[in-house]
Amino acid sequence: MAETVESTVMEGTLGSQGQGQKSPEKEATSGSGLSASQRKLVVLMTHINIAMYSTCFWIQQGALPYLTKKLGVDPVVYGYLQTTFAVVQLCGGPLFGRFGDLFGTRSALVLAFSAAALSYGLLGMAEGMLLLFLSRLPSFLMHSMQGAQMVVTDISDENSRADALGKLGLSYGIGMIVGPFLGGQVTKYFSEQHSAYLAMAGSLVSIVLVVLFIPANTKAGKKASESSKDDSGPSSVFDVKAIAKLLTIPVAAYLLLVRTIVGTPLGIFQSMFSVIAMDRFNIGPEENGYLMSYIGMSNMVMMGLGVGILTKRYNEGLLLKWAIYMFTFGYLLLAGANVTWHIYVTVIPLTIGGTIMNTVISSTLTKVVPPDSTGTMLGLSMASNSIIRTMSPTVGGLMLGYAGYPSFGIVGFVVNTLLSVYMLFSQTHATVVAAVERQNAKKES
């Protein structure tokens, strides 16, 4: 296993550098063929769009549980609604990434924001369960964050990629602060449907910004038309073999497995959070907006400041272990939380752990695949989250109904404690870390 992991990383991801390609220093300078000022503008507009996307998403996300309750949807059906969203996103993520690899990030982002606008519009028109469920279907293509990660990955060098991806979380965090607050106020003074329409309007603005400011393709030295032509046209978007091939890279498979294991307890808790907030802590729409804004602010600080500092000082393997330790501590606090302010304390270690883990894993995954497959790899990474969200509402509902609220913290604590012990003594984990470190060292030399 050790030799397989290391040789695959060395040969598969470093082989292109031995074929007369640009050195890392030149790639950092030339990037995707854009000048320094153009790259800055593209990054700025990408961050603005992600802040817009996050704002719109959390406007409707905050209104959704109250709208479903208003329409008489019980918690079981609400769980089915969340599962529908997760299944649709699971199917769309890898295909969306492949579409971006072939046809360019601008086309991919336009598609993502159009899907978001359609989803929110249908939600605003919902007066029964049919439109509620139909509003979840456009999320098959609603992968704006993944599209933004594709842009940043393409135009950043590998040494600064984790920091660049982390700063996307800063912009997303702004939306998590503004969105729930706006959604809470609009719902309070108007209605849940008006919140959905506001989210739709914001998504339409993002489409205009993408068309005006994002290049057709951000990959180095390759136009979108050339990319699609090389891969035999639109049908290659559905090339399952090309997508599945990336999972045969041992480092990628290991990191995706870790992400899925760690993310499962958190996904289960998040799927039931709105129900828990309403029923156990008696949190209304306005206070829920304040709580979500607080979580967004915590994410923003960690993504914007913490990730950049940590990734410059410590290697990926150590940071991944620290993330698991923070999760373990956070779940221990969660198990004992019984008043509202306990939740405010609990989200701090959970936020820190989630931020470090997601950023480090996403950055490393884009380094262990060829440059023309980074979008697809990010799609597979997003798909792991969708797998979790697919089963989380059902499992979360059963846990809440039969084991009670403390079970969420207990399960998370046990899972992350076992994973921590495995990472401390596992030869596979040590080999993966060593392989990635050797890869980084060779690219810096």
Image (tube, rainbow, N blue to C red):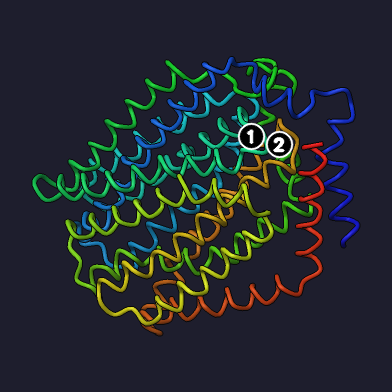
Q: Nearer the viewer, residue 349 or 66?
A: 349
The type of residue carrying mark 1 is: Arg
Image quarter of the C terminus:
top right
Residue 135 coordinates in the image, percent (x, y)? 34, 44
Q: Is residue 116 above or below residue 180?
A: above
Residue appearing at x 73%, y 46% in the figure: 244
Q: Secondary structure at mark 2?
A: loop
* Residue denoted by label 1: 98
Q: Is residue 193 above or below residue 341?
A: above
* Quarter assignment of residue 67: bottom left
Label 1: few (<14), some (14–19) or many (≥20) C-alpha neighbours in 10 Å: many
Asked if labels 1 and 2 touch by Cβ distance under 8 angstroms, the answer is: yes
Q: Nearer the viewer, residue 91 or 220?
A: 220
Residue 333 coordinates in the image, percent (x, y)? 41, 77
Q: Which mark is residue 170?
A: none
* Residue denoted by label 2: 239
Q: Is residue 286 left or right of residue 169?
A: left
Q: Nearer the viewer, mark 2 or mark 1?
A: 1
Residue 407 coordinates in the image, percent (x, y)? 43, 81
Q: Is residue 399 left or right of residue 55?
A: right
Q: Is residue 272 above or below residue 384?
A: below
Q: Is residue 400 above or below residue 363?
A: below
Q: Secondary structure at mark 1?
A: helix
Q: Nearer the viewer, residue 234 or 286?
A: 286
The type of residue carrying mark 2 is: Asp
As measured in the structure, the alpha-carbon distance from the residue carrying label 2 to the one carrying label 1 is 9 Å
Residue appearing at x 62%, y 36% in the figure: 375
Residue appearing at x 22%, y 48% in the figure: 181
Label 2: few (<14), some (14–19) or many (≥20) C-alpha neighbours in 10 Å: few
